Image (spheres, helix red, strand yellow):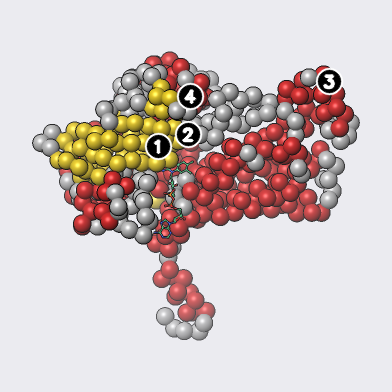
Amino acid sequence: MALKSPEQYVESLRDGRVTFWDGENIPDITKFPRFRVPIALTAKDYEYDDPELGALRRYKPEEGGDAHRIYQIPRNTEELNKRVELLGHTSIGTAVSSVFTALMSVKDQVSAVNPQYGENIERMYRYCRDNDLRGAEVITDPKGDRKRRAHEQDDPDLYVRVVERRKDGIVVRGAKLHITAASVIHELVVMPTKGMRQDETDYAVSFSIPVNTPGVKIINRNFAPAELNAFDYPASSHHSMPEGFVIFDDVFVPWDRVFLAGEVQLASKLAQSLGLWERTGGVIGAVETSELFVGLAQLVTEMQGKESDAVAQASIAELITYAQMLKMSLDYACRHYEKTESGMVYPNTLAINAAKYYYAANYHQTVKYLHDLSGGLVLTLPGEADLRNPESGKYIRKYLHTKQSVDVEQRMRVYNLIRDLTADAYGGWHFVVALQAGGGLPAQRFMMNRTYDIKAAKEKALRAAGVKV
Ligand SMILES: Cc1cc2nc3c(=O)[nH]c(=O)nc-3n(C[C@H](O)[C@H](O)[C@H](O)COP(=O)(O)OP(=O)(O)OC[C@H]3O[C@@H](n4cnc5c(N)ncnc54)[C@H](O)[C@@H]3O)c2cc1C
């Protein structure tokens, strides 16, 4: 078992992986400017000697040694709370490795159908944990015409599928879209995007392969221009992660890395196992963002002398409600945790789905309150270069003055953060992420309908209506 240093992590990315960005096939991503921030962020999670976060990042597995806590399978409330704390202090490049926790949560069900697959899950989990690797959650297929099933599409490759079964493994073809951090991690952990039927056996496939496996190609995209200035872009200049359009061009996967190849009854179990941890991560991020919104709203209000205005106070109360509801929901989900048969503790499924739904369904409205309070400067504030130019800067300082206690530069920084978080590229990304990442609103509705105690609710209603039950 060996923890990597940040430098060893960066070095490990020089492995011949095939990735594209801005029309270039990039021979070494560690030298490509677009990857600077994403790699630096992910590398930070390898700083095990960090005085503040080092202890949170590592844990001691039963087998001895040290490993990154993202691999700790929570077995009690304390470990669950530690995991939640870690997810609040870790980059998404590391957080996506929760895919292994998800796999381990269904390992017993997979073993019951095929013990070899269960063993493969356990071995891959240990291999990645012990070598301090990171894995991406590779689930969402292109899906083509949504009305038609996988095998009914015009092009049979619109869902990842097995195209050949060999003695030593399978050959897969297809693509997975929107895969967060795909180019800056080590293993692509592939799962079906949804349940599959009996006539879709080739599409019920799950496995893990290194990013540099022959036939794997990744096309990257994200919200951040290559070089960002921290004054104008206080959030996205140091926080960005590419999403990958991941192609499997007849990729060979040896049997010992296969978790599913045809047993359709397991497809939805694997697909759903990840949803809970993805949504938990989404809610943790939303708690953080919603608290920032309250602070930003209060700051712009005070800076513009509107703090005693009833409408401003009402808008801030709406933002507080949003932030507090999310915080309480996360707390409830952790305190009312659930347990798998093998003893893994995980946040309450109904509470996490309700919280993620609440976050997503109300996000756009919540941002509207912040925009309403802030005014047009959110979009039109001049940039840092014009502030620093003495000729233009003197006008910016003069006309952005509100009152003696407000420093113009500080006011600009607050506006820049509001714009960066909510109004241009990164802000637009957040709007879509709230709705779609971790599954769209219907995915949470489906889970809530499945997990809520409808029988008890019906009985309660009948009793209240005077009907004996
Ligand atoms: C920034 C970002 C990061 C992401 N990261 C990852 C990742 O790391 N790994 C990963 O696997 N995925 C990732 N996703 C993908 C995400 O889970 C999907 O975007 C989401 O599940 C919606 O799927 P879709 O994009 O294919 O849209 P669609 O399937 O077109 O869904 C859009 C809407 O249409 C509805 N819909 C779909 N089919 C039907 C139908 N037949 N009838 C009626 N309505 C329908 C959906 O429920 C949804 O409301 C990410 C997405 C984003 C935006």
Nearest to the eye among marks 1 and 4: give it: 1
The answer to whether 351 is drawn above or below residue 251 in the figure is below
Residue 319 percent across, percent down from the top left: 67, 49
Mark 4 or mark 3: name the one nearer the start of the chain: 4
Q: Mark 1 points at which residue?
A: 245
Mark 2 or mark 4: name the one nearer the start of the chain: 4
Q: Which residue lies at the image location 68% right of the left edge and 28% below the top edge?
A: 232
Residue 349 lies left or right of residue 360; in this view the side is left
Asked whether residue 58 is in view, the answer is no
Q: Do the numbered discs 1 and 4 sit on residues whose CB atoms are within 8 Å? A: no
Residue 130 percent across, percent down from the top left: 31, 25
Q: What amino acid is found at the position of numbered circle 4 in the picture?
A: Phe
- Kindly state the secondary structure of the residue where label 1 is placed: strand
- Kindly state the secondary structure of the residue where label 2 is placed: strand
Q: Which residue lies at the image location 47% right of the left edge and 34% below the top edge?
A: 221
Q: Do the numbered discs 1 and 3 sit on residues whose CB atoms are within 8 Å? A: no
Q: Name the residue under label 4.
A: 35
Q: Do the numbered discs 2 and 1 sit on residues whose CB atoms are within 8 Å? A: yes
Q: Mark 3 points at which residue?
A: 391
Q: Do the numbered discs 2 and 4 sit on residues whose CB atoms are within 8 Å? A: no
Tell me how far mark 4 sits from mark 3, CA to CA.
Answer: 36 Å
